[in-house]
Image: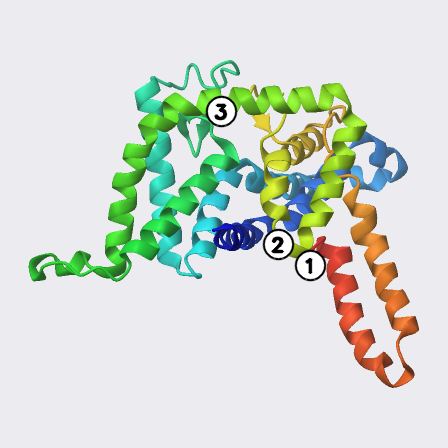
Amino acid sequence: MRKKLFGQLQRIGKALMLPVAILPAAGLLLAFGAALQGEQLQSYLPFIQADGVQNVAEMMAAAGSIIFENLPIIFAMGVAIGLAGGDGVAAIAAFVGFIILNKTMGEFLGVTPDNVGDAAKGYASVLGIPTLQTGVFGGIIIGALAAWCYNKFYNISLPSYLGFFAGKRFVPIVMATTSFLLAFPMALVWPVIQNGLNAFSEGLLDSNTGLAVFLFGFIKRLLIPFGLHHIFHAPFWFEFGSYTNMAGEIIRGDQRIFIEQIREGTNLTAGKFMQGEFPVMMFGLPAAALAIYHTAKPENKKVVAGLMGSAALTSFLTGITE
């Protein structure tokens, strides 16, 4: 039983790597775009105040920002593909399920464009749909459900007169029905879960921030060899904490809040659960790779250099250390 659960957690962790892999590129676009628009950098490099440079910077920031604004649907489709063995039908099913879930919850709760942004109730606009904000967790739930529907029904046989809908074509149909039914308990239960997450995260940070960050980093590094760290850090990066931006939208998660504050040029209050890793990724592990190269036997140095060099470069550029 324990071995089976461990295997399932590893599968979920690997599935989360697909949507997570796009975040460094989006973060770089947003960070460079925001930096070029910042007054501090402009005071050192006056030439970047030119209209052409500022237009490019604005487009870079917008291109990076759109990824972070739509993380829930990206996670839904990415998790579905990862758990379904890479089949795109699961991603289509996840997209169908995601929009139906959000539209149904919005209609059930009476969410309208007028009360979107109500922080107390957790209402938000998701893909233009006034609904209850479930964030990345909602996307992961839908992605896992879409993968389950795919694995269960992708080879189903139907009577000849319904043959067109047999096999993989049946998966989005099942997903549409399942997500519609899921919307009602989600609408009732999720606010309680979200309030619990908020209370836990606020208590964690308010009690002893230093200890909380240390334990987070320590546990995450321990989980990396087992492939479970993506499951562990997802709540911290994408759900814990909340911030209301200048547009009145509720932003959740340490990473998303940090990126949003960079984009808006406000004082940084987030990023605590990310900062300790970058020195390790960018310098600690590449230094360890260099040490391994120097201590390798002379006849093996060429092979070790290729292996360690590529691993060190991957760690430095992307933060992937597995």
- Considering every residue shown, the one lying at the far bottom of the view is 299
- Indicate the amino acid at tag 2: Gly
Q: Residue at x 92, y 72 (%)?
A: 294
Q: Which residue is mark 1?
A: 322
Figure check: 112 above or below 57: above
Which residue is painted at 63% across and 55% down in the image?
226
Mark 2 in CB contact with mark 1 (< 8 angstroms) = yes
CA distance for labels 2 and 1:
8 Å
Secondary structure beneath dot 3 equals helix
The disc placed on residue 227 is 2
In the rendering, which numbered label is found on residue 193?
A: 3
Residue at left offset 43%, top offset 40%: 141
Question: On the rendered structure, is 276 left or right of 166?
Answer: right
Question: Mark 1 or mark 3: which comes first in sequence?
Answer: 3
Q: Position of residue 145 (x, y in %)?
A: 38, 45
Tell me: residue 141, above or below residue 251.
Answer: below
Amino acid on which the number 1 mark rests in the picture: Glu
Between 8 and 83, the one nearer to me in the picture: 8
Q: Quadrant of residue 48?
A: top right
Query: How many residues crowd mark 1 within 10 Å: few (<14), some (14–19), many (20+)?
Result: few
Q: Residues within 10 Å of mark 3 (few under 14, many from 20)?
A: few
**Where residue 189 sits: x, y (%)?**
41, 23
